[in-house]
Image (tube, helix red, strand yellow):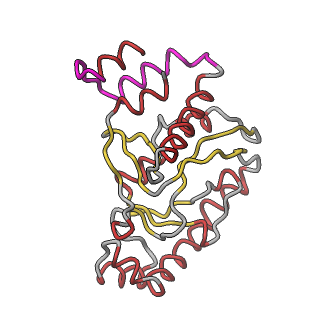
């Protein structure tokens, strides 16, 4: 890994990030500390950014490349996968479906000004109020995951553009996603989670400077060094 990083920094090597990470993770599958260390490095990356006086951002993986999600923070969460999977299924499917529609109608009605400033058209907003569905290409995201005690309360929801921002938050090789993937139901452990900014109902929100910035792949690979 160190040699790969050196060549990348010197612009002497190009890699398919997804393919490389897939191969690399296979070599580390029996290392019990590997993913925990990656979570710690991601937390350190965020802390060091703030120490340099830079605004908060989360470094995330997406199949098209690495992104910095400006306005996001990276937070240490003592994560416990919900043991009651029937309750989780109810919250994720039946309850969320009803809450999502009501929430979309409410923000379309009461927070149209913010939605317009973020780039939504009046037609988009009117359709949200009429149908209770997000605009094409957007998803409703739980700020704190339902699988870890998050709820379907309105203040735990944010509207996110699906590609790339929402998919990037849930990117398969993000350290937090990898830690959760290895946890059994009822198991807990520290996870580095990308958390959306609290002062917006939609992401990206160009009016607030909350946008995703492409980053060099080497920045992300350094987390796994």
Q: Position of residue 10 (x, y in %)?
A: 26, 20
The part of the chain drawn in magenta is 9-31
Q: Position of residue 87 (x, y in %)?
A: 73, 57
Residue at the image position 42 percent from the left and 25 percent from the top: 21
Is residue 8 shown left or right of residue 92?
Answer: left
In the rendered image, which quarter is residue 81 located in? top right
Q: Position of residue 114 (x, y in %)?
A: 41, 78
| 123 lies above or below 77 | below
Residue at the image position 48 percent from the left and 52 percent from the top: 56
| 200 lies above or below 82 | below
| 161 lies above or below 122 | above
Residue in front for this viewpoint, 107 or 139: 107
Residue in front for this viewpoint, 173 or 60: 60
Residue at the image position 38 percent from the left and 77 percent from the top: 115
Q: Position of residue 46 (x, y in %)?
A: 51, 43
Residue in front for this viewpoint, 95 or 144: 144
Q: Is residue 93 magenta?
A: no
Residue at the image position 33 percent from the left and 66 percent from the top: 206
| 47 lies above or below 91 | above
């Amino acid at each position: 890994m160190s040699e790969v990083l050196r060549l990348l920094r010197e612009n002497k090597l190009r890699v398919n990030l997804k393919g490389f990470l897939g191969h690399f993770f296979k070599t580390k599958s029996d290392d019990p500390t590997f993913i925990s260390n990656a979570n710690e490095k991601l937390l350190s990356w965020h802390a060091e950014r703030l120490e340099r006086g830079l605004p908060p951002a989360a470094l995330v993986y997406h199949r098209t490349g690495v992104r910095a999600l400006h306005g996001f923070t990276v937070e240490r969460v003592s994560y416990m996968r919900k043991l009651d999977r029937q309750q989780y299924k109810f919250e994720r499917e039946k309850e969320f479906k009803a809450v999502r529609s009501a929430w979309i109608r409410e923000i379309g009605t009461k927070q149209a000004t913010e939605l317009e400033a973020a780039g939504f058209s009046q037609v988009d907003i009117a359709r949200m109020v009429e149908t209770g569905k997000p605009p094409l290409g957007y998803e409703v995201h739980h700020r704190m995951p339902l699988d870890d005690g998050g709820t379907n309360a309105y203040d735990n929801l944010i509207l996110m553009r699906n590609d790339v921002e929402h998919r990037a938050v849930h990117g398969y090789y993000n350290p937090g996603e990898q830690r959760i993937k290895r946890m059994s139901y009822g198991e807990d452990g520290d996870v580095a989670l990308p958390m959306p900014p609290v002062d917006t109902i939609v992401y990206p929100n160009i009016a607030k400077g909350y946008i995703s910035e492409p980053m060099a792949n080497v920045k992300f690979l350094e987390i796994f060094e």
